[in-house]
Structures are given as structure tokens and as C-alpha cells.
Image (cartoon, rainbow, N blue to C red):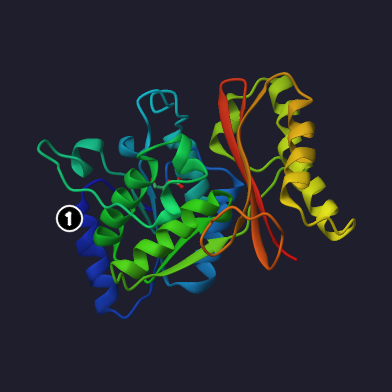
């Protein structure tokens, strides 16, 4: 695996690959890789000749009081995980490369997709995400790009951006990877104490409860479902709910009655760590 720090070098490499008619699969990440990220790489390997993974902890998607400084990093471990999967190129630019002095251009999805769910409590977050993802798309120019379904709203927002800005890139959403006990894999899980790690299981438990209520008990009223989920999460004292929402999968609008394809999504602080999780259901 070759590590590339310069965006121009990355661009030239991909140009050469394209001239040789090789397809390029791209997995953008912020590093501290876990099996969720590796599942994206594995999916990319099935579909493409050349795999590019980027690691860049993107400052513009973190709010002023968020965890940019404490976001976990371990380049050596990430490198060896990617080498084990035979990744061809790791693009690892410095912040000054991506946002040099005088930087002033941002990409913002202004449909209603960005001001709800995580966008409500993290204003500016998706603007940072769509800005960096467009920059990475312009540099790597992949045929396909892979994103985890754990960030369901991010997938919707990126799909919207790709459509609106005519990027010729296919976006592939890869299912959530969970620990054996149900906790959705996340780089931030490392920040949980042993007790918080246990408390965090209430997130997946509440989603499973929602699924059972809908599929087994035929309950369709979302306020009943959300209340039951809330009870499970609030049963642990380390939890502070940011949101629990049941929304239409297409436009992410809140719904009163579960019908068709819906996203049940939540964000919860466990201690100081903000975790998200979701399930997609067809009812
Ligand atoms: O999902 C992430 O890790 C980040 O939001 C992404 C897509 C790499 C952009 O920084």
C-alpha cells in the first residue's frame, strides 16, 4: 500500500489508473478504523480494480465544543489493517493541504435534509461533511464511493449532493457492523468506560424493541414506539438523549404512523461520548 500525502500526486495516480481502464473504489474515513470501516473496504474490493482509502479528521465538520481534539487517532494500526486488506493507496493529507490559508469555499446541501436529526444538534456539521467529501471526490475521482449506513443521514445528504452537483460517482451504502452484543461499531466507542460501554447497549436494545413493537405487536404510532425506546435508554443514568426519531426514509421528515420504508434513528450521549445508531424498516 502506498501512502500519499499530496493531493496532486493522488490525482495523477488516479488519472493513470483511469487511462489503463481500471475502476477506482473509494472509502473516505476519519481513521481509527474498526470492522465497520473494513466492511466498506471489503465491499469496495468486490466491485473495483483499485482501492483508495482516505484518512482525514476533517475539522470543518466538528462544532466548537465537539471532540475534534480528542477524536481517536492511530495511524500505525490503521495502516496495518489496510495493508492486510491489500488496499492500494492510502490518501492521508494534512489539514493545511485541504484547507490552506485563505480557504473560503463550502458545499452546503440546503434541502430539508440537513437541518434535522444530527443536523439540528450539530449545526454546520453536514456543511463540513459535504465540503470535504466533494474535495475528496474531486481529487480521487472514484467510480464508486462507500459509506456506512450507521451515518444514515450522511448517506442521504451525500446522495443529494451527488445528484445536485452531477458527480459521476455511484454511492454505495454498506450495512452497520455491530459488536456481538449489538453495539454499533464506532471509533468513539473507545472513549466509553466499562460501565458506559454496558450502558451503551441500551441504544441497540431500544432499536430492537422498536422493531418488535412494529413487526410483532403491530404498533404503528410513532409516539408510542419512541416512548418505549426512551424508557429503555433512560433506564441508565449515564444517558442523555439528543434525539429519537422515526422518519420517512426518502426525505427524513418525522412521521406519526409507520408506513413504507422508515428510518428509526437516535443520538444519545453516554457520559461524554455522543453515539448514533439506527435501523431501517419496511412496514
Ligand atoms: O463518516 C465519516 O467518517 C466522515 O464524515 C467522512 C465521510 C469521512 C467525511 O469526513
The residue under label 1 is 8
Mark 1 surroundings within 10 Å by alpha-carbon count, few (fewer than 14), some (14 through 19), many (20 or more):
few
**Location of residue 184 by image quarter:** top right
Label 1 element class: helix
Q: Is residue 79 above or below residue 16?
A: above
Which of 23 and 207 lies nearest the eye of the viewer?
207
Q: Which residue lies most toward the right here?
A: 217
* Residue at horizontal 54 percent and vertical 65 percent from the top: 250
**Location of residue 64 by image quarter:** top left
Specify whether 73 is left or right of 168.
Answer: right
Residue 68 image position (x, y, % from top left): 39, 28
Residue 208 image position (x, y, % from top left): 79, 48
Residue 200 image position (x, y, % from top left): 70, 31
Q: Is mark 1 within 8 Å of ligand 1?
A: no
Specify whether 168 is left or right of 231.
Answer: left
Quarter of the image containing the C terminus? bottom right
Q: Is residue 50 visible?
A: yes
Q: Is residue 158 above or below residue 179?
A: below
* Residue at horizontal 72 percent and vertical 60 percent from the top: 258
Quarter of the image containing the N terminus? bottom left
Which of 107 and 171 lies nearest the eye of the viewer?
107
* Residue at horizontal 35 percent and vertical 42 percent from the top: 56
Q: How many marks?
A: 1
Residue 65 image position (x, y, % from top left): 40, 23
* Residue at horizontal 73 percent and vertical 20 percent from the top: 195
Q: Which residue lies most toward the left here?
A: 102
Q: Is residue 182 visible?
A: no
Amino acid at each position: 500500500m502506498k501512502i500519499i500525502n499530496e493531493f496532486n500526486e493522488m490525482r495523477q495516480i488516479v488519472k493513470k489508473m483511469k487511462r489503463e481502464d481500471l475502476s477506482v473504489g473509494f472509502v473516505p474515513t476519519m481513521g481509527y478504523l474498526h470492522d465497520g470501516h473494513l466492511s466498506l473496504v471489503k465491499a469496495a474490493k468486490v466491485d473495483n480494480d483499485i482501492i483508495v482509502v482516505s484518512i482525514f479528521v476533517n475539522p470543518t465538520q466538528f462544532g466548537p465544543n465537539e471532540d475534534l481534539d480528542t477524536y481517536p487517532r492511530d495511524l500505525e494500526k490503521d495502516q496495518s489493517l489496510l495493508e492486510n486488506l491489500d488496499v492500494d493507496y492510502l490518501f492521508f493529507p494534512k489539514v493545511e493541504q485541504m484547507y490552506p490559508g485563505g480557504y473560503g469555499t463550502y458545499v452546503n446541501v440546503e434541502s430539508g435534509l440537513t437541518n434535522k436529526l444530527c443536523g439540528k444538534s450539530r449545526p454546520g456539521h453536514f456543511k463540513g461533511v459535504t465540503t470535504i467529501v466533494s474535495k475528496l471526490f474531486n481529487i480521487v475521482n472514484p467510480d464508486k464511493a462507500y459509506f456506512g449506513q450507521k451515518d444514515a443521514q450522511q448517506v442521504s445528504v451525500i446522495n443529494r449532493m451527488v445528484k445536485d452537483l452531477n458527480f459521476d460517482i455511484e454511492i454505495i451504502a454498506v450495512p452497520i457492523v455491530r459488536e456481538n452484543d449489538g453495539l454499533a461499531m464506532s471509533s468513539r466507542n473507545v472513549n466509553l468506560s466499562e460501565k458506559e460501554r454496558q450502558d451503551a447497549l441500551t441504544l441497540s436494545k431500544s432499536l430492537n424493541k422498536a422493531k418488535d413493537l412494529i413487526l410483532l405487536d403491530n404498533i404503528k404510532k410513532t409516539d408510542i414506539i419512541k416512548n418505549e425506546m426512551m424508557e429503555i435508554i433512560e433506564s441508565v443514568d449515564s444517558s442523555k438523549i439528543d434525539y429519537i426519531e422515526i422518519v420517512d426514509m426518502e426525505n427524513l421528515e418525522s412521521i406519526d404512523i409507520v408506513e413504507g420504508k422508515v428510518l428509526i434513528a437516535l443520538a444519545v450521549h453516554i457520559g461524554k461520548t455522543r453515539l448514533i445508531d439506527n435501523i431501517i424498516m419496511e412496514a
